[in-house]
Image (cartoon, coloured by chain):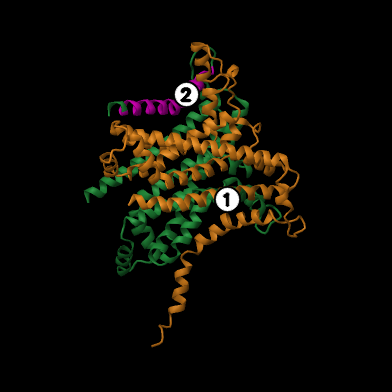
Amino acid sequence: MPPPPDRPSRRLTVWLGVVPFLLFALLFLILPTLQIVTGAFRTPDGGVTLQNIRGLMTPSILGALTISLRLSLVTAFLGCAIGLILAAAVTRGGLPGWLRATTMTFSGVASNFAGVPLAFAFIATLGRLGLLTVILRDWFGVNLMAVGFNLISFTGLALAYLYFQIPLMVLIITPALDGLRKDWREAAESLGASGAQYWRMVALPVLGPSLIGTFALLFANAFGAVATAMALTGSSLSILPIILFAQIRGDVLQDPYLGYAVAFAMIVVTGVANLIYVTLRARAERWQK
Amino acid sequence: MKAQRLVSWIIFAFGAAYFLLPLIGTVEFSLRARRGVYSLDAYRNVLSDPQFRDTLTYSFVLAILTIVLGVLIVAPTAFWVRLKLPALRPVVEFITLMPLVIPPIVIVFGYIRMYNTSSALPLLGSATGSDILLMCGYATLSLPYMYRAIDTGLRAIDVPTLTEAAQSLGAGWITILARVILPNILTAILSGAFLTFAIVIGEYVLAALLNRPAFGPYMVWMGSNKAYEPAALAVVAFAITWMAMGLIQLVSRFSKQTQARR
C-alpha cells in the first residue's frame, strides 16, 4: 500500500514548529560563538593560523589566566567545603525545620546576587570605611589594613565570590544529602562504625560524584564572572575576563585576533569544567532514585 | 546527639554572620551620607538623579520585553517538542544549556564581531538596533532558566490530551497555545519570568559592551564617582532581587493551593 500522499509535506510542517527557536539560537548564540572560535584561528587577511593561540603564551595573558584559574579553584574548593558543611548542619544536624527552609530560600536569592551590587556590599562592609573594618578598629583595636588585609586584592575578591559560591553549593548538594538513606547510617553503626567512619567510608564515596561535579560547576561559575571583579577592583587585579573586557572596549592587546584567542581559551576552560559536571551528575543521580 | 546539635548551631551561626554582615554593612553604609548622624541623604540623592530614573526605567522596560520574547520563543518550542518531536528534545535541551557554558562576555564579543556596522546585519549601527541586540542577548542568557521552568510546567499537565480535546472542538494551533496550554503553565512561566527579571535588571557586561544606558553600567559609574550612593543602589538592587524571588515563591505556593482544591 502506498503511503498517504500528504505525508512528506506533513513531515516538513512538523519540523517548521521548531524553526523560530533554532533560528534564534543560531543568530544569537551559535553563530556569534563560532565567530569567536574561527576568529581565534584566523589571520587578518583570512588565512588559517595557530599564531593567535601561540600569542596566548605571553607573560601578561598567562599571568591573568593563572590568577583566574587560582581564583576559580580556591573559591570553588572553599565554596564546596563550606557549602557542604553548612548544608549538612542544616539538613541533618538536628536544627529546627524552619531554619532549613529559610536557608534554602536565602540560598536561592544569594546565588543570584552576583555582579555589581555584591561588590558594593563588600566595599560597605570590609572596605576602608566599611562597617566591619570600623567595628574591628574602634571596639577591638584591630586595624585590618595593618594586618595586611586589603579588600581590593585576590583575597578580597575570593571572599566576595564565596557569597554566591557557597549558596549555589547548598542548593545543589542538599538534594544529594537527602538521598543518603537513614538505613545506611544504621547499617554502618550496627557494624560498629563511628560517625567519622560513616562519613569517610559511606557518605563521602556516595556523594563523591556530586561533590566533584558541583566543584566543576562552581569553578566555571567563578571563571566566567566579570561584573563583581570590575566593580570591586576596577582593573587593578587582572583576571582573564577583565583583560578580555578591556580588549573589547579598547583593543588593549593591540591585536583583535589575540582577543578572539583569549575568548576561545575561556570557552575551552568553562567547556571542560561543564563537561565534567554533566558527566558526574549523571553518575551521582544513580543514588538519588 | 546534644553535642552534634551544638556544633550545628555554631556552624549555622558562622554562616549567618558571613551572609548577613554584608547586608547590614550595606544598609548602615548607605545611611552615613551626612556626617555624624544617620540620614536618608544617599537615597534622596539617588532618587533625585534623573540618570537613576532613566537607566532603571530602561532596564525595567528591557526586562519586560526580554520576558515576552523569551516566552514567545521557548513556550511554543517546548510544547511542540513534547508533542511532536520528542527525538529533538536532547538537542533543544543542549542548546538551552549553552548560555551557562559560554561566558556572557564571549557571547557579546561574538555579537560585536557579527553585527558591527560593516556586517551584513549592522544592528550595532543604530540605537534601536543595539537595543534589539541587547534584548536578544538577555533572552539568550535567560534561555536555560526559561526553558527549564516552562518544561517543568509542561511535564505537570497532559499535553497530548489537552491538545486533542482542543482540536476536536475545532481550535487551531495558536488558539491551543494561547488559550489552553499557556493558562495551564502560567505559574511556571511566571517563575521563569521573575528569574529573568532579576538577571536583566542589574546586568552589567552586555549593556556596557553594547554601550546601552542600562542600570548596571549606571551602578558601576556611581561606584567609581560617589561614596555612599553606591551602597544605596546596592540596597535598591537587592530589594528588587528579593522581590522577584519572593514573587516566585508566592506564585508557586498559590498554584499548589489551587491544584489541591481541584
Q: Is residue B207 left or right of residue B29?
A: right
Q: Which chain is green?
A: B
Looking at the picture, does residue A204 appear above or below residue B237? below
A154 displayed left or right of A46 = left
Magenta span: B4-33
Kindly identify the amino acid type of the residue bearing the numbered disc 1: Ile
Look at the picture and state if B53 lies above or below B31: below
Q: Chain of mark 1?
A: B
Image location of residue B40, percent across then percent down? 49, 20
SS at mark 2 in the image: helix
Q: Check disc 2: other Cα within 10 Å, few if <14, some if 14-19, many if 20+.
A: some
Secondary structure under badge 1? helix
Q: Colour of chain A?
A: orange
Tag 1 near tag 2, CB within 8 Å: no
Front in this rendered view, residue A15 or A218:
A218
> How far separated are the C-alphas under marks 1 and 2?
35 Å
Residue ID at (39%, 62%): B82
Q: Is residue A102 visible?
A: no
Magenta segment includes B231: no
Placement of A68 over or under B74, stated as above or below? above
Observer able to see residue B130: yes
Q: Which residue is mark 2?
A: B27
Q: Which residue is mark 1?
A: B132
Report the chain holding disc 2: B
- Majority secondary structure of the magenta segment? helix
Q: Residue furthest bottom?
A: A1
